[in-house]
Amino acid sequence: MNIMKIFKEERIRNIKSLEKDIELHKKSNEWLIASAKHKYSYNFDWMGRPIIQYPQDIVAMQEIIWQVKPDLIIETGIAHGGSLIFSASMLAQLDMIDAINKGVSIDPKKSNRKVIGIDIDIRTHNQAAIEAHPMSSRIQMIQGSSISPEIIKKVKQEASGYERILVCLDSNHTHEHVLAELEAYAPLTSLGSYCVVFDTVVEDLPENLFPDRPWGTGNNPKTAVWEYLETHSEFEIDRLIPNKLLITVAPDGYLKRIK
């Protein structure tokens, strides 16, 4: 009897039952809306840097990174750098496991695994804090618009030679911008890996939550995902992830490359 096989099969059944619980989904969305009014996602750090994510999505990303074991993670949007630190720390753990399995030591400064972070405005104090962090040797920051031809070209050059690539999009949340990011960076996603589009939840939130933002209902990351998938069958939405999280900023945003 394979205990873990039985456990995982039970888990899948649980998640599928959650998918059908319309009332629970409704309550989860109501809670998310209520918490968003208090900037709930601003309350958490990863290794000392604000990560500005819901804990459920942080756990989901940990599971994805452990499963995919990427050599390279590309992230658009840096802010305070917590997500970069999180990704770098996960890559460090992958290196540690490799070292244990091979019976060798790995110098983090010589590791091939790294995170590339792109932001149109990397604030000086954030850059200094990230560069001073113990995970900094695994992080490369690029300042500029993530959809400018020059930046796209540079990222593609940096990504050359990497076999397992994970992509996370979390910068400007307008439909046009996210669609351009998808066209630029989603193709870099390796087979079996993910392109995660954050804040697709904007489509499901009240319009008055974003009075000072250029995005909202009908113009956001989720609408960009829907349009992108119309012509890119190499990706599919992994619905198991949001269905088990219930509370997530990325419904329809966990895109798995299947071919």
Image (cartoon, rainbow, N blue to C red):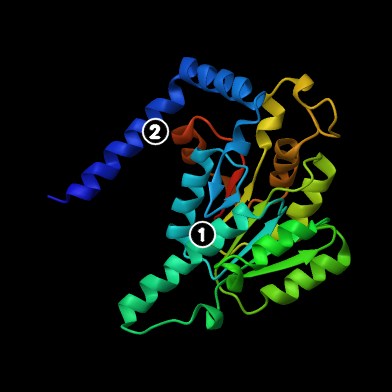
* Circle 1 SS class: loop
Q: Position of residue 220 (x, y in %)?
A: 77, 36
Q: Which residue is mark 1?
A: 192
Front-most of 59 and 123?
123
First in residue order: circle 1 vs circle 2 = 2
* Circle 2 SS class: helix
Amino acid type of disc 2?
Ile
Most extreme residue toward the top is 23
Q: Relative to residue 109, is residue 62 depicted above or below?
A: above
**Left or right placement of residue 34 versus residue 124 in this view:** left
Q: Position of residue 17 (x, y in %)?
A: 38, 26
Q: Quadrant of the C terminus?
A: bottom right
Q: Residue at x 51, y 50 (%)?
A: 61
Q: Relative to residue 107, is residue 122 depicted above or below?
A: above
Between the residue at mark 1 and the residue at mark 2, the CA separation in whole angstroms equals 21 Å
Residue 184 in view of the camera: yes
Q: Residue at x 85, y 58 (%)?
A: 145
Packing grade of label 1 (10 A; few <14, some 14-19, many >=20) is some
Most extreme residue toward the left is 1
**Left or right placement of residue 65 versus residue 203 in this view:** left
Amino acid type of disc 1?
Gly
Residue 251 in view of the camera: no
Q: Relative to residue 107, is residue 97 depicted above or below?
A: above
**Left or right placement of residue 197 versus residue 154 in this view:** left
Answer with the quarter of the image where residue 128 lies. bottom right
Q: Which residue is mark 2?
A: 15
Front-most of 171 and 178?
171
Q: Position of residue 196 (x, y in %)?
A: 61, 49
Q: Residue at x 87, y 65 (%)?
A: 149
Front-most of 161 and 120?
120
Q: Residue at x 60, y 31 (%)?
A: 40
